[in-house]
Amino acid sequence: MSLHGKTAFVTGGTGFIGGRLIEVLTSQFDMRVRALVRNNHAGSGAFRLAGCGAEIFEGDITDPARMERGVDGCDYVFHCAFGTTGAPKLDRPITVGGTTNLARAAAAAGVRHFVNLSTMVVFGETPESVDESFVPRKMWDWPYPHEKLDAERAVAAEHARSSLPVSTLRLGTVYGPWGPAFTYYPISSLKNGRVVLVDDGAGVSNAVYVDDVIQAMILAAERNDHAAETFIVRGPDRVTWREFYEAYQAMLNTDSLVTMTLSEVKAESRRQQITAIKRAAPEAISVLKRDAGFKRLAGQLPLVKAGWKLYRGSIGKPPKALAPPPARSEPADTRPLIALPEMMWGYYASRTDFRIDRARERLGYRPVYDLARGMALTRAWAEWAGLIGPA
């Protein structure tokens, strides 16, 4: 089933993957694209998609009636949007509720195919090799994978109710031009501090260049059967986190990588938290001590004095495990250590190689951007964007 000349509704069109998808659909498939934009403050992403000739459709994915209007007359739906604030109360209604609304609207409109973007992190803790048959057993304790898995379930439920043709793509670490988490963030971190790699970066990143993701999305939309299918999507080569970050380090011509064991990363994170508290507590207490109401209240709480004594006694006495190393003759590197977010430690430590056999066999997916080729294109974009200097 060819996409040429057809109409698509794209959510997340002002974002990284959705923006690139719209560029490809309009330029290579001559498609009419209606792109969902939450409001008129979408910024540069809206300019990017407008430059492709896409129709900007303003609306909120949590509004079922607006989604019905958005998909009306569309042949395909590409769902790239999700909640991005990091606050579950704000993100869940978008990621889960919004997906439910969109899938229901797509079914009512009789779209030919619904392509839903998901993520490998829904698998949680995994063995060394995993395919789509693996059932999540122990998920990581951060909201995003739980929200995305529930969004997958919402799409599956709509398929069961209405036979909506659905493909869900579980993506690896997506990088490339305009990428936030795995392009801009690594470059910015390596420029501004020392980036900590868990276990020398031996974990497997399952990196995938954005254009390989776009290839998989288009192949999924062109499927002729109406079954609901899930596909793992990653690049053609096995890429560790060290190899991934070293590619960015080479762009910057810097030495900014630090290796730690997972236990050392945890210790460093605790040290940073303790340091932050020690810096903030005296000033906070000083402000409070000037408040007469606080003084009266504090006098009625005997634990305040004991707590202050405990805090005061701990100053200058860090646990042995966090004591500074012996002085060395060479100048100390004073750049800040940038540790990974605690909730993602398991993700970066995982050595799972996710298999793409199903995508190869059923979609004809053939990833063509190995790390060298993908990073060369990413470097060219980063130079154009002024994130790095010319080679």
Image (tube, grey):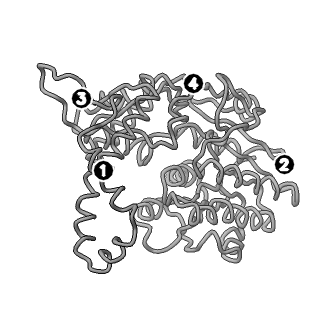
What is the secondary structure assignment of the residue under circle 2?
A: loop
**Residue position marked by numbered label 2 in the rendering:** 226
**Residue position marked by numbered label 1 in the rendering:** 276
Compute the Cα span from label 4 to label 3.
27 Å
Residue 322: image x %, image y %?
Answer: 32, 32
Residue 86: image x %, image y %?
Answer: 51, 57
- Image side of residue 87 versus residue 217, left or right: left
- Image side of residue 347 versus residue 92, left or right: left
**Residue position marked by numbered label 3 in the rendering:** 253
Q: Nearer the viewer, mark 4 or mark 1?
A: 1
Crowding near pointer 2: few (<14 within 10 Å), some, many (20+)?
some
Kind of residue at badge 1: Ala
- Above or below residue 303? Residue 225 is above
Q: Earlier in the sequence, mark 3 or mark 1?
A: 3
Q: Earlier in the sequence, mark 4 or mark 1?
A: 1
Q: Residue furthest top?
A: 329
Q: Earlier in the sequence, mark 3 or mark 2?
A: 2
Q: How many marks?
A: 4
Compute the Cα span from label 1 to label 2.
54 Å
Kind of residue at badge 3: Asn
- Image side of residue 234 versus residue 310, left or right: right
**Residue position marked by numbered label 4 in the rendering:** 351
Asked if the residue under mark 2 is in contact with the one under mark 1, i.e. CB atoms within 8 Å, the reply is no
Residue 334 in which image quadrant:
top left
Crowding near pointer 3: few (<14 within 10 Å), some, many (20+)?
some
